[in-house]
Image (tube, rainbow, N blue to C red):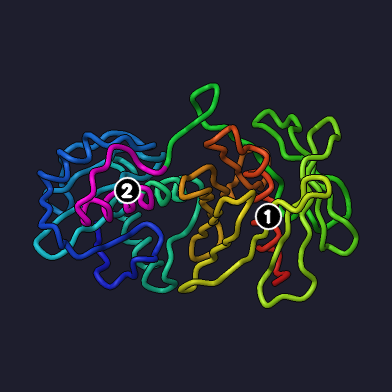
Amino acid sequence: MVFFGNISDDTSGFKKHKNTAGLTNAILLEKLSGISVSFGTPKMGTMMKKEAVVYEHVSDTWDVYVLANDKNVQIGRVYSQGVNAGLGALKEAGIMALTGSLAQNSATSAADRAVDELDEIIKKLLNGEEVTESNVSISTSSGNSIKLYMRQKVFTIRDKYSICDLDETPVYYVKGNITGLGFSIQYADGSDIMTIKKKLVAITPEYTLFEGNENIGHIKKKIKLGRAEIQGEVKGQPIMIKGDMVGHSFNIFLNGKAVGNVDTARLTWGDCYSIEVLDESVKDLVVTIAVICDNTLKGND
């Protein structure tokens, strides 16, 4: 594994903090073993012949690690054993050096989300806080996240488009109007859920959400240190959508809790956005945010 000591804390897939609490890898393993996360359990391993706490096979391609020394605590992803680690890591390192971000795909995005989730825990531990679980948890009737898929470039033609399950069965429809400034979200039976209205004149995209005639929220895109970030409020609760540096992956937080994510993932049946719902009670809202994320990527800002 190649470490990138000058990478910003905002870089996808890698975080670094000053070790103000004097954490060691042994202490981290003990603490992290008692903290519930969405991506596995930790074990002691090695990283470049150095002791590190490792979460194995967070995705098909990546492990995630935490490595503490006297100065810093690093959190990052590394190729899983047996996944062409040597040449693959060097190739990705070259991409990082040239572009400042790693090539994105669904496995990479999943690992990046795990790094972000773990990063929030490490920051709390460095502050001396007691932590029992991360800010990411699955709250669905099945106990598993709900996965939906939306075709890319859904608004390039004026028509109704579907958001489907993995069997390509429509679960939602999205309909855009002629101006491109309004979108409606419907269930598969045609009943209305929500309407999104986009502000005509704005430096960065701004959206207002309606249930029927009721204004329930306002969302605005911002650029923070080169990364996409969408903030606002829905039904009195703060909402934040954090995107990676190249706009391929978005994590959705409602009142500080992760409720879903959106990835631009290539599936066997075509180029799609992958929508993952972590909290079933706000499934419709997560789908609505996915539509907004899609719109912000269309070059309309």
Circle 2/circle 1 CB separation < 8 Å = no
Rendered image: mark on residue 217: 1
Label 1: which secondary element: strand
10 Å crowding of disc 2: few (<14), some (14-19), many (20+): many
Q: Is residue 7 above or below residue 169?
A: below
- Identify residue for label 2: 118
Residue at 61% in and 41% down: 267
Q: Earlier in the sequence, mark 2 or mark 1?
A: 2
Magenta stretch encompasses residue 229 = no
Name which residue type carries label 2. Leu
Magenta-colored span: 115-135
Rendered location of residue 235, percent (x, y): 64, 48
The quarter holding residue 90 reads bottom left
Q: Is residue 176 above or below residue 164?
A: below
Query: In the image, 145: left or right of 268?
Result: left
Residue at 69% in and 44% down: 150
Q: Is residue 121 above or below residue 4?
A: above
Rendered location of residue 68, percent (x, y): 15, 55
Residue at 81% in and 48% down: 184
Which of 9/110 is in front? 9
Rendered location of residue 293, percent (x, y): 64, 56
The quarter holding residue 15 reads bottom left
